[in-house]
Amino acid sequence: MSQRLFYNLFATDGFIDLPIDPTGTEPRRRVYIFGFAGGLFKTQPISFGVPTGPATIVNPQFDITVPPNLDALRGKAVIPSPRIDMEIGDELYITLVNLGLFLTSPPILDVHTIHIHGGHVATQVDGVPETSFGLPVTPPGTPAIAATYYFKPEKPGTYFYHCHQEASEHVQMGMYGALIVYPSALSLAQAGITKSLTTGRWFFKGRPQPQIPVTATNRNFAYSDVNSFFNSDWVLLFSDIDTRWHDAVFAQTGFNPVDYKPDYWLVNGRTFPDTLLPTVLPPALVPNFGYSVPDGYDCFVRVSTGDPGRRIPPDKFLLRMINIGYQPVPFHVHGWHGMIVGKDANPRTASEMNFTTLVGSGESYDVLYTADDKRPIYADYIFCGKAGFPSLKDQIAAATAQSMAAGTFIPPFPGATDLWVNIILKTSLGQGTFIPPYNWVPWNYGTPTADNFMFPQFYLAHNHDDYKVTNNGVYPGGQLIIIETDFPGSNYKASPPVITEPAHVCPPAPIP
């Protein structure tokens, strides 16, 4: 069943507090921004464009006819703007209210627009003020001045939206968000991809597809292509900030964009170590420790490997890479090669594989990864040793003891007692004991409890212009995320942890 989706977005300003050190616990750098607050207001079922029922209000706090709603959102912008999800066959209505930029003195009364980047729309709703329209400010205490944009997507894929008024400045200031279009059940069926209504099993042109679980829906496909199936998808929205430009806008002193030189690089509006945090933080942590971002922008990627013994296949996960920044992003994923299944909302039919995706400004890529199991190749070496080398754990223990005796021991962080310590545990996780699921237990990092357990595995994914993996030059920071791979059914955060992975058994010693 298709829907009409009614989003109410409110142009306003705000602040974000960026980390200045790898722990995220030092006093932060406050940065002035623009953005869109709000989100999904109501939905209405339709069939081939005709309503089949009444509209349902989902978030009454975004009703533009209620003046207190407007006042409650003034000054509440964050980066990025709300994520919009829809399907082929849906109709999108975005009502924009310009609340103005009242945190400055005097207020900035710019017009604002919404441009759907990559959407094939008529000029009148393209959100370019030179050829469409720009929305003026609604003063405090007055009824909302509003206009509504209409978008009916013609193809699934990864899009985004942004303000196109003085785009050089307003995009830099933070007026952008992701827009994801999934294939519908109908569009999948038209491509020969169907699901049995009785058994839940999937078929492609009549042939069973056992690799697709019965729990999958049309939103487990990137395109109307059976090879674009995924277990989970993750938006990675890249951007960059020159804090001098933001300071100049706030002070209204002027800034020449040709002097642009970013000092922060963001993924989903955050820099490492904040990229480890859930989208919504406990109130006690805001603003001194970080800031919440809209739902749908988690970038701590957590997936599951397979288990052949139980016939559980490894997860397939899709990274939807979007670059709204002003610099190219060579994004490198450790651990796996990915298959490019789409670019700029167009499917890729050739099986192009890579381990670094160069995402230019204004581009989007859909890259599909398989969380395969590293145990068959590496477990013997890590836990048992090979080729005359002792186990890697024993090597690290020996190196730690030797370096301590020699006076050259440099721990990964103050207080660490050996080299086999996960530095992640001491980043923003100084607060992590009450921000699940980020209070990791380092099973595979040498603790006696973890002997011969391979999982969880942690892989970096980051901008390979490595100076952009800093916060104003301080490493690590910037465009850096973590991908955690778990053994199926294990829960390392439970108390006590639930571990379904069998402990590794060393092979018999070779006969001399």
Image (cartoon, rainbow, N blue to C red):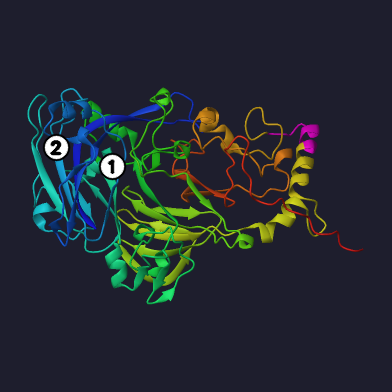
Q: Residue furthest right?
A: 512
Mark 1, Cα crowd under 10 Å, few <14 / some 14-19 / many 20+, is: many
Magenta residues span 401-410
Q: Residue furthest front?
A: 198
Determine the residue located farthest toward the bottom in the rendered image.
Answer: 206
Residue 274, picture quadrant: top left
- The question of residue 221 being in magenta is answered with no
Q: Is residue 21 above or below residue 213?
A: above
x and y percentages locating residue 430 in the rendered image: 54, 28
Secondary structure of the residue carrying numbered label 2: strand
Secondary structure state at the residue bearing disc 1: loop
Left or right: 156 in relation to 435: left
- Residue 222 image point, x, y percent: 36, 61
Which picture quadrant has residue 29? Answer: top left
**Where on the picture, by quarter, is residue 413?**
top right
Q: Does residue 106 appear left or right of residue 183 in this picture? A: left
Residue on which the image places disc 1? 82
Q: Residue at x 66, y 57 (%)?
A: 375
- Residue 409 on the magenta span: yes
Q: Main secondary structure of the magenta part?
A: helix
> Which amino acid does the dot numbered 1 rest on?
Pro
Label 2–label 1 contact, CB within 8 A: no
The N terminus - image quarter:
bottom left
Q: Amino acid at mark 2?
A: Val
The vertical placement of 122 against 247, above or below, is below
Q: Position of residue 97 (x, y in %)?
A: 14, 37
Q: Please name the residue that numbered disc 2 is placed on.
A: 97
